[in-house]
Structure formats: C-alpha cells, structure tokens
Image (tube, rainbow, N blue to C red):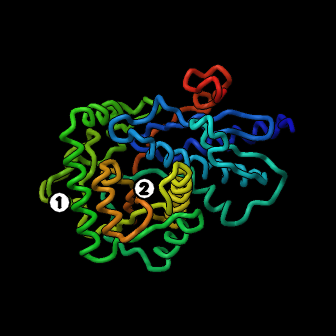
Amino acid sequence: MTISVAERSDLITAISAAVRAPSIHNTQPWLFRLRDSGVDLYADPARQLPVSDPDGRALRLSCGAALLNLRLGLAHLGHALSCELLPDRDDPALLARVHLTGRTRPTWREETLYAAIARRHSNRQPFLATYVAPDLRTRLVQAAREEGAWLDLMIGPPALDMVAELVRVADGILNHDDGYRAELATWTRRVDTDADGVPSSAGGPAPDPGDLLVTRDFGGPPRPAARPFETDPLVAVLGGHGELPTDDLIAGQALQRVLLTATSNGLSTSLFSQPIDVPSIREQLRLGLRRSGSPRILLRTGYGVPGTPTPRRPVAEVLTDLTHPHLTADAA
C-alpha cells in the first residue's frame, strides 16, 4: 500500500507530536522514517548517554514515550493503526513499526490526551502544597496499567524516605564519576536557543543539600535561604513487568500516558532517573517495592505554577532516509 499525499501530511503532523515526548537531559534520541504503509521509529545512537545509560534503557524509555505520542497523533487525525515493537531482530535500532490500517474515530480519551501533549513539560520548580485527590491518584495508576506497566505511589514517610535516600545515594555515586559530570555538562545549555538539552531557564533551582529529593544541577539560580524545595511531594515509581528491550518501550508508552493524564488533570510533573542509572541502587529500589520487574523511572507530581518547556528539534531534523549516517545498511 502506498500512502497518499494526505496520509504523508498526517504522518508528519503525528511526528511533530511524537517529538514532544520527554527524554533524559532532553537528548531526544529518536529518528523517524516514512514508509509506504506508515512510519518506522528508530533509536538515534548518537544521542545515547554512554555513562548514565550504557545499555540504552533510558533511550528506549524515551522512544517509547515518543511512540505513545505518535499513536495519539494518528488517532486524533482519524487513523486506525497497528504497531510492532522491535520488528526486525537483525536491526535493534528499529524500535517500532507503525502501520496505517484504515480510518476510525478518535475516542474522547485519545482526544483528551492528545490535547495535553503540547502542554506537558517537565516542571523542575517546587510545587504547591496542594493535596492530590485519591481519585486522581487512582487515574495515574490506571494509566500505567493500560499500557502494560505499573506505577507505585510512595505514600507515607517510610516509603518516601526510602526513595529519597536512594535518590541521594545514587546522585552521590554518579557525581563522583568525572565522565558523568562531563556528560551532564554536555547537555546543559546556558542559552535558550539550542534545540536540545536543558537550558537553565527550564532546569529548576540549584540543588541544595537539605532538599528531600536531590535534583540535578542544570545551572539554575539558588533558592532564597531557608526555603525548602518541598517537604511532602507526591512521588511515584514506574516500572515494567520484564527486563527485555520491548519492556522498556512498553514502560515508555506507559510513562507518557501517566504524564499526559497528569497534565490533562492540571498536574505538573518532573522526572528522576538517578536511582535507575546505578544498577545496584535500581535493584535496591526493586526489592524495596517488592516488584519482580525493574523500575524504569521516578516521577514527582503536584500542582505548580507554569514552568518553562525545553526546546525541541524540528521534524525535518528527525526524519531519516536510506542514507542517514546513524543507521546501519541493514536498517536502511
């Protein structure tokens, strides 16, 4: 089947939604290739973090989030689709293949989540001390389940203290690595004109040793003295049911559904990956949660004042063809 001019336009529109997905340090590690029957999603190995993500877990998580946005974009435009994860065992860079299969009407839920894509961004500023209602917490947990993953809310001081301590220990281990600090500096932007990385305007305030949750330092200004970041944040851990690369892609789609559900209900979010980046700490977190599958990311959510979104690369920059240098000959 050959796609029409209108379908090609719809695919590009959906890719423009896909690139709004979150990624660690805003690396945006994805590429897209239009096909006769749809679009392929590739990992961009040039944007993998070699120190903090040597196995590509965070890269696949980010690409899974982009895939969920792509699906919602196509649903919004009235396309039915099918999706294969890792469809070619000889080409691990090809993460997903999306086929257009006909026309359909988007559901109310799909339209609600699609509308949230443009508004969602990581908010690294302190949130308000406003309680998140139980029914909304339940919706976040259910959103992860709908995509085949799990979300555990850290309720009560023991659970929150356990996670906070693991974040603190992992952050300390990472920052003792010269390579990690150099990697973080590489993706920290001092100006807002770059199309990737985290500018200081979106990086939140500088971390403080007294904070409950240790944040990364993206060059933000110090907070006023004696003002705590947050004393009782709502923190959750998202994870998958397996350890295969496909499970990372599933978890990424679940993460984005959770984030869009939060956004559509007026919540702000930010992400913590330090305990995931250190394998021994990741295992301690899994054991502490009594889960069989590994945690993939920590997220913090609550009500906040509007923050500054991170920039995105233009669609033309993430569209690839047969000659793209980041793809193997087999992938092409």
Residues 178 and 257: in front is: 178
- Tell me the residue at 82%/38% (across/down): 6
Residue 301 appears in the picture as rendered: yes
Residue at 67% x, 51% y: name it: 71
Q: Secondary structure at mark 1?
A: loop
Quarter occupied by residue 177:
top left
- Please identify the quadrant where the C terminus is shown: top right
Instruction: Measuring from the top left, give residue 102's x and y in whole percent.
Output: 84, 51
Which numbered disc, 1 or 2, marks the residue that appears first in the sequence? 1
Can residue 65 be seen?
A: no
Q: Amino acid at mark 2?
A: Arg
Furthest-left residue in view? 226
What amino acid is at disc 1? Answer: Arg
**Residue 33 location (% of width, % of height):** 67, 33
Give the image location of residue 137, x and y in percent: 46, 74
The CA span between labels 1 and 2 is: 31 Å
In the picture of the structure, the residue carrying the numbered disc 2 is: 296
Residue 260: which numbered mark, if any? none
Residue under the image location 80 percent in, 40 percent down = 37
Q: Are marks 1 and 2 in contact (CB under 8 Å)?
A: no
Q: Residues within 10 Å of mark 2 (few under 14, many from 20)?
A: many
What residue does disc 1 label?
227
- Residue 101 as seen in the image, left or right of residue 61: right
Above or below residue 16? Residue 252 is below
Point 35% across, 68% down: residue: 234
